[in-house]
Amino acid sequence: MLLIKSLIGWVIQIVVMGTILLLPADTWLWSEAIILLVVWAILGLSGTIYLSIFYPKSLEARMIFPISKRQPVSDRFATIFIIIAVAFWLTFIPMDVFKFQLLPTPIIQLQVLGLFLVIVGYVLMIIAIIQNEFAVPSVINQSDRGQELRDTGLYGKIRHPFYLGFLVCFGGLPLWLKSYAGLIGLSLILIGFVGRIFVEERILRKTLPGYTEYTARVPYRLVPFLW
């Protein structure tokens, strides 16, 4: 049942993503977007099946709706901001590619690098989910689930590896789709994540035993040796 619900959710995500990209492009023959959607579908299908077999608790945690009354108001606003920013950003990329053309087109080598980053970033997100079954889409008190501190693997290097994977993945996306302006626009989403990180860490310090000591051991939030 969990696998079926997850796969249905993933199909809906592909349809929504494809619609947001292809409708503003005013063409269904955008090869880069089609390839991206195929790669995204393969990554999502394989990742969902793998998690359902070996890490069902991690997959179940990702099924929690990202907006709920259990969230702090500040995180609710941050989550809504991120969702709107992502939708706006995805809509902007095809408009820039086919209409605005604000900046020169990336060379083919950077395009290929972009697709590679999409894959690497997605794999990072899957690894982060595997290593922390409490990595839910919203900032909530999970003491009722017996939440425990995770400080090994990627979490032994940075405190928010899922967010890093997301940004790497979505940083590669506009390069593959030939939009430098889209890459610059990713900064809008980054602002949302930075705000959410501060909210999340404030909650975790209050609700998760050992988290304050963990932040001292692992000083970097998002990027090793930088921040």
Image (spheres, rainbow, N blue to C red):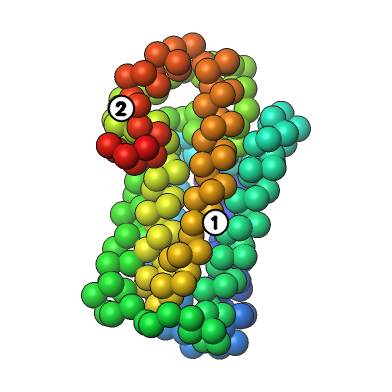
Residue 79 visible in the displayed image: yes
On the image, numbered disc 1 is attached to which residue? 188
On the image, numbered disc 2 is attached to which residue? 156
Query: Who's the residue at 39% across and 57% down the image?
Result: 169
Task: Locate the N terminus by quadrant.
Answer: top right
189 over 217 or under it: above or below: below
Task: Indicate the quadrant where residue 183 lies.
Answer: bottom left
98 over 61 or under it: above or below: below
Q: Earlier in the sequence, mark 1 or mark 2?
A: 2
Q: Residues within 10 Å of mark 1 (few under 14, many from 20)?
A: some
Query: Who's the residue at 58% across and 23% down the image?
Result: 203
The image position of residue 14, as x and y in percent, is: 54, 64
Query: Mark 1: which secondary structure?
Result: helix
35 over 56 or under it: above or below: below
- 199, 114: nearer the viewer: 199
Task: Locate the C terminus by quadrant.
Answer: top left
- 1, 98: nearer the viewer: 98
The disc labelled 1 sits on which kind of residue? Leu
* Numbered marks: total: 2
Query: Mark 2: which secondary structure?
Result: helix
Q: Nearer the viewer, mark 1 or mark 2?
A: 1
